[in-house]
Image (cartoon, coloured by chain):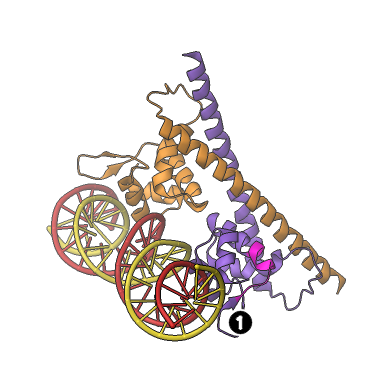
Chain colours: A purple, B orange, C yellow, D red
Amino acid sequence: MKIGELSQRTDTPVRMLRYYEEQELIESERLPNGYRDYEDYVVDRVRQVRGLLDVGLPTRIIKQILPCLDGPRAIHMPYVTPDMIATLEHERDRMAEKIVCLTKNHRAIDEYLNAVSHEIRAS
Amino acid sequence: MKIGELSQRTDTPVRMLRYYEEQELIESERLPNGYRDYEDYVVDRVRQVRGLLDVGLPTRIIKQILPCLDGPRAIHMPYVTPDMIATLEHERDRMAEKIVCLTKNHRAIDEYLNAVSHEIRAS
DNA sequence: GTTGACTCTCACATTAATGTCACACATCGA
DNA sequence: TCGATGTGTGACATTAATGTGAGAGTCAAC
């Protein structure tokens, strides 16, 4: 598919798709005319990238962890450097912290909203 | 407490503490000499702000939701505009999405690391 | 009482993600 | 074939969070 369709299907500005490619988060073939040509799986990939960006990970890190996230398919784990392991452990732990933070605040907002809506009902 | 101590206790650059104040996320009194003077509760507040920033919320939004997060104390809910409600609902839902995203990716990384460590054990 | 650590304000730099614009070529439909 | 729309590259702008440095006042300890 061409970049316009990918843009629509992922609700992502074309500008950003080219940027993600520059950051080596996604890849594309080229059609004879020079247009980018994406495979279907890129749709999910873009969504995942956006999710991770949204949650505060910089492209630098996303690029590193993406290969480990491609699902539990037959990854030969070749050349997994200790550095890489350390990075992954670190990011995993930071994610855990973020989940705690988000869960706590999500609940607080939810409780607040419930309280407010009761207030309204009572008035 | 003065800004240096707050900085240490929250592991936050002094520069950022002044920035958060400028963004109206925290507040301070002033000592006779002009130095900022923080109350104890600000320590937790700063940690919360940093957590939310870390999870991708901009200061603009944090400022809005902070008052609802001050715990379930006796908040008179005065003047809760419909706009505000809408913002809160929106942010709450976005947080839920983020939790899903983080949980999924956290698990994926964890599984990957387990697989790698088994690989190692087996070799 | 001088020195060093802390604080103040103000300004400028930086980085990452993103927006916007310009100009050229491609494509497709009327 | 013309014109609208899509795509390509490249450059510049912007915003938010953060770093860094200058210049001046404060304070505590020696």
Magenta residues span A37-45
Q: Which residue ends up furthest to the top in the rendered image?
A: A123
Q: Is residue A3 above or below residue A100?
A: below
Quarter of the image where one finds residue A70 = bottom right
Residue A67 drawn at (x, y percent) = 68, 70
Q: Is residue A63 above or below residue C1?
A: below
Q: Is residue B109 visible?
A: yes
Chain letter of the residue carrying label 1: A
Give the side of residue D12 with respect to residue C18, left or right: left
User: Residue at image x 33%, y 39%?
Assistant: B27
Q: Amino acid at mark 1?
A: Leu
Q: Is residue A61 above or below residue A93?
A: below
Give the side of residue B53 with respect to residue C22, left or right: right
Residue D13 drawn at (x, y percent) = 30, 67
Q: Secondary structure at mark 1?
A: loop
Residue B40 drawn at (x, y percent) = 41, 37
Image quarter of the N terminus of chain B: top left
Q: Nearer the viewer, residue A97 or B36?
A: A97
Give the residue pinned by disc 1.
A31
Mark 1 Cα shell of 10 Å, populated few (<14), some (14-19), many (≥20): few
Residue A39 among magenta residues: yes
Q: Is residue B19 above or below residue D6?
A: above
Quarter of the image where one finds residue C19 = bottom left
User: Residue at image x 76%, y 59%?
Assistant: B111
Q: Nearer the viewer, residue B100 or B27?
A: B100
Q: Nearer the viewer, residue B119 or A12?
A: A12
Q: Is residue A85 visible?
A: no
Q: Nearer the viewer, residue A117 or B34?
A: A117
User: Residue at image x 79%, y 63%?
Assistant: A72
Residue B102 drawn at (x, y percent) = 63, 52
Residue A82 among magenta residues: no
Give the side of residue B59 with respect to residue A65, left or right: left
